[in-house]
Amino acid sequence: MDYSQVLGQFLKGGKKITDESPLILITCSGVSNTGKLTAQVAGILAQKEPDLFEGHVHAKQSTRDMEAVINGGKVVVIDGCGDRCAAKKLKSFFITPHIHIIATEEGIEKNGMGDPKFEEIETLIAAVRREVRR
């Protein structure tokens, strides 16, 4: 087992992550259509299913903000593309996401600075729901 995986089971304050731990959502910090998509999906899920996630942090937020939200939760990462910006930021905390969803791996094309399409939003929301409810 990788040392970072062992550390990732525990967070500040020695809190052990269990099946009952709250879900914490971390989204991509990108400005491309897929990066914007992750933030939109987080916002929609917060409105439609407010109890699904205990908290949400954009990967571009400060380390202190991220630590405060993550503390004690199971981490769900939604990255926009294979650059995996959100997952990379978590790696600096020795945290491996419990669930990692990448928009481009769900069939969504990264195509520049355009706005996400409705179908892409629905596709990514469905992927998050599918993975969280496994």
Image (tube, rainbow, N blue to C red):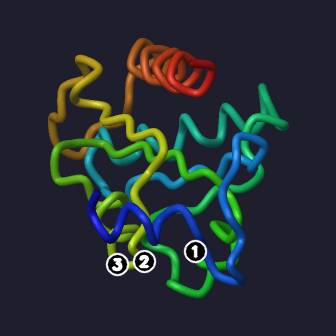
Nearer the camera: disc 3 or disc 1: 3
Above or below, comparing residue 96 to residue 32 in the picture = below
Whole-angstrom CA distance, mark 3 to mark 1, is: 11 Å
| Residue highlighted by disc 3 | 92
User: In the image shown, does 38 or 101 lie closer to the viewer?
Assistant: 101
Q: Are marks 3 and 2 in contact (CB under 8 Å)?
A: yes
Q: Amino acid at mark 1?
A: Met
| Residue highlighted by disc 2 | 93
Whole-angstrom CA distance, mark 3 to mark 2, is: 4 Å
Ranked by sequence position, the earlier of labels 3 and 1 is 1
Q: Say few, some or many: other residues with alpha carbon within 10 Å of mark 1 (under 14 / 14 to 19 / 20 or more).
A: many
Above or below, comparing residue 65 to residue 25 in the picture = below
Q: Amino acid at mark 3?
A: Ser
Q: Which element carries disc 3, helix, strand or loop?
A: loop
* Coordinates of residue 124 in the picture (x, y in percent): 44, 23
Ranked by sequence position, the earlier of labels 1 and 2 is 1
Q: Which element carries disc 1, helix, strand or loop?
A: helix
Q: Is residue 92 left or right of residue 98?
A: left
Q: Amino acid at mark 2?
A: Phe
Q: Is residue 14 left or right of residue 113?
A: right
Q: Which residue is drawn at the image coordinates 64% and 56% (left, top)?
A: 56
Above or below, comparing residue 114 to residue 15 in the picture = above
Q: Which element carries disc 2, helix, strand or loop?
A: loop
Q: Say few, some or many: other residues with alpha carbon within 10 Å of mark 2 (under 14 / 14 to 19 / 20 or more).
A: some
Q: Which residue is drawn at the image coordinates 55% and 34% (left, top)?
A: 41
In what quadrant of the picture does the N terminus appear? bottom left
* Coordinates of residue 121 in the picture (x, y in percent): 47, 23
Which mark, residue 66? 1
Q: Are marks 1 and 2 in contact (CB under 8 Å)?
A: yes
Residue found farthest to the front: 1
